[in-house]
């Protein structure tokens, strides 16, 4: 490294550390601005501070943060302390901040392993700099149309990023026709994961035709445009797809769930890995968390790590930042579940309507830049699942677009007396616990950040960057 490069590295890392230190002095997370400060001095500082590390990148529409959390838990239980952008700051600046803040002033990484959550649109910037050994693509759904555009644009963004790191192993969801199509366009080695037909048949009474009415972002063959046939659905467009006109269809995955037993708190599954059947206990409920678990297991195995360590760790995995995260306030159990698009929101509503216990629902909708200014997606969500659920005793709406959410509920025939709109987060926190029933908060991204800060303060929890639940354990 030249003297000029060493000087630039020193300035970039120094600026990153100083900015983060000052922000945290004032109780700010310091997740993005420190990275921007570093990039001001050296546009390729991320390449320097990640050199020689073993890196797993997780991208896709839904499940990135939870999949990374599962991987992080497995690493820690294996005695490895990985670097990770725990807060979910997953653009170039946020990822740079994490790497630069955990490197020496000369740019040498202090850690050997990293688990990186990466925004779909940022993969083409990040991947060639950090050169990951494994890239996981969880799924692709319509999300933030005003930011990402049509879903094919997002797919092409990911494809471009992958093409820049041809040595990386791709872990792809075989049930997602969009995600699976990436295998045919790149030279990377590929490892497929998915959920099998017998599993869905045992755990879902809906037929493929009935499920076909749910919002689908990939109804037509990506190769020839013919409408897919499905032997089964898991949810939305995920499942056993096949094109009747060409040979494109779901591939038999190397890692496949063959049986599921779920409760409101956990899932017990059987996985076929190659020709071996393995029983796995997942410490989180819901079908989408099973997808997250097998994505994490596929990545762990693709990285050449001990499969059994990952399997064992899944039993003790906890909710991640704002994703099924639990709080207790005013002697009431509160669970926060981030929702940001129709597919993910419908899965969350399925989970609530399966609880068979009385509860209060809180729907928080913002339209800030990080959320996407287009909130029309709420009309594609089947809110009737909770409107018609006899166990849902009250629905609160909040956020900058609370009125839009209330109108959506009224169009779903929700009773006026069951809906209450509260703008103030502090008043909302007090009101939603009045009935002493379990509370489920469904916020989108910026609403989640604000509410989580208030809940953390009210319940005595540290900021996420101090809380031991969210920071890497020290040796």
Image: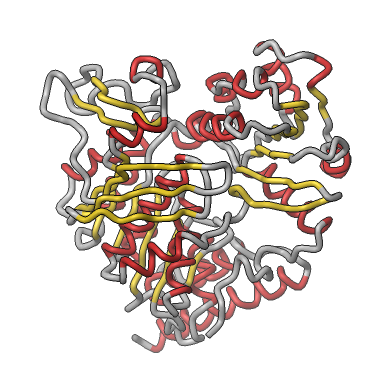
Lateral position of residue 404 relative to residue 259, left or right: right
Compare residues 372 and 247 and report the one nearer the observer: 247
Lateral position of residue 234 relative to residue 184, left or right: right
Q: Position of residue 66 (x, y in %)?
A: 50, 53
Compare residues 193 and 457 and report the one nearer the observer: 193
Q: Is residue 45 above or below residue 283?
A: below
Lateral position of residue 165 relative to residue 130, left or right: left
Q: Residue at x 22, y 53 (%)?
A: 191
The scheme the figure's colours follow is secondary structure
Q: Position of residue 283 (x, y in %)?
A: 51, 55
Q: Residue at x 39, y 42 (%)?
A: 260
Q: Within the image, what quadrant is residue 405 found in?
A: top right
Q: Within the image, what quadrant is residue 385 found in?
A: top right
Q: Is residue 424 above or below residue 56?
A: above
| Quarter in which the N terminus is drawn | bottom left
Q: Within the image, what quadrant is residue 391 found in?
A: top right
Residue 130 visible, this orientation? yes
Q: Is residue 350 above or below residue 31?
A: above
């Amino acid at each position: 490294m030249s003297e000029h490069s060493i000087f630039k590295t020193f300035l970039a890392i120094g600026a990153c550390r100083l900015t983060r230190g000052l922000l945290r002095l004032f109780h700010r997370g310091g997740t993005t601005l420190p990275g921007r400060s570093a990039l001001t001095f050296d546009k390729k500082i991320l390449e320097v501070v990640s050199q020689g590390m073993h890196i797993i990148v997780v991208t896709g529409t839904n499940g990135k943060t939870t999949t990374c959390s599962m991987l992080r838990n497995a690493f820690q239980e294996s005695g490895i302390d990985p670097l990770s952008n725990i807060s979910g700051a997953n653009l170039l600046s946020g990822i740079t901040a994490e790497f630069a803040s955990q490197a020496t002033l000369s740019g040498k990484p202090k850690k050997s392993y990293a688990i990186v959550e990466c925004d779909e649109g940022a993969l083409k910037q990040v991947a060639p700099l950090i050169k990951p050994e494994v890239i996981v693509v969880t799924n692709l759904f319509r999300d933030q149309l005003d930011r990402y555009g049509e879903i094919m644009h997002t797919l092409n963004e990911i494809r471009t990023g992958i093409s820049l790191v041809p040595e990386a192993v791709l872990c792809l969801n075989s049930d997602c026709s969009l995600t699976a199509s990436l295998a045919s366009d790149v030279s990377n080695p590929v490892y497929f994961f998915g959920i099998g037909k017998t599993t869905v048949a045992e755990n879902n009474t809906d037929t493929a035709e009935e499920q076909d009415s749910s919002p689908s972002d990939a109804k037509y063959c990506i190769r020839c445009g013919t409408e897919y046939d499905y032997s089964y659905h898991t949810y939305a467009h995920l499942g056993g797809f096949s094109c009747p006109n060409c040979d494109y269809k779901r591939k038999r995955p190397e890692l496949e769930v063959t049986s599921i037993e779920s409760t409101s708190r956990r899932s017990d599954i059987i996985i076929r890995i190659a020709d071996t059947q393995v029983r796995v206990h997942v410490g989180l409920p819901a079908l989408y968390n099973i997808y997250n678990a097998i994505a994490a297991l596929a990545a762990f195995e693709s990285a050449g790590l001990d499969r059994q360590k990952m399997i064992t760790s899944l039993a003790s995995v906890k909710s991640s930042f704002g994703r099924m995260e639990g709080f207790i306030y005013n002697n009431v159990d509160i669970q926060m579940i981030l929702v940001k698009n129709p597919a993910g929101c419908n899965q969350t509503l399925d989970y609530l309507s399966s609880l068979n216990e009385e509860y209060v629902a809180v729907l928080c909708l913002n339209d800030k830049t990080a959320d996407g200014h287009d909130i029309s997606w709420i009309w594609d969500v089947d809110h009737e699942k909770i409107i018609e659920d006899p166990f849902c005793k009250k629905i609160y709406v909040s956020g900058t677009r609370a009125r839009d959410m209330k109108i959506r509920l009224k169009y779903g025939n929700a009773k006026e007396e069951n809906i209450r709109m509260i703008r103030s987060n502090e008043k909302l926190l007090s009101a939603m616990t009045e009935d002493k029933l379990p509370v489920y908060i469904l916020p989108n991204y910026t609403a989640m950040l604000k509410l989580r800060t208030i809940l953390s303060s009210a319940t005595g929890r540290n900021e996420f960057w101090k809380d031991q639940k969210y920071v890497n354990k020290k040796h």
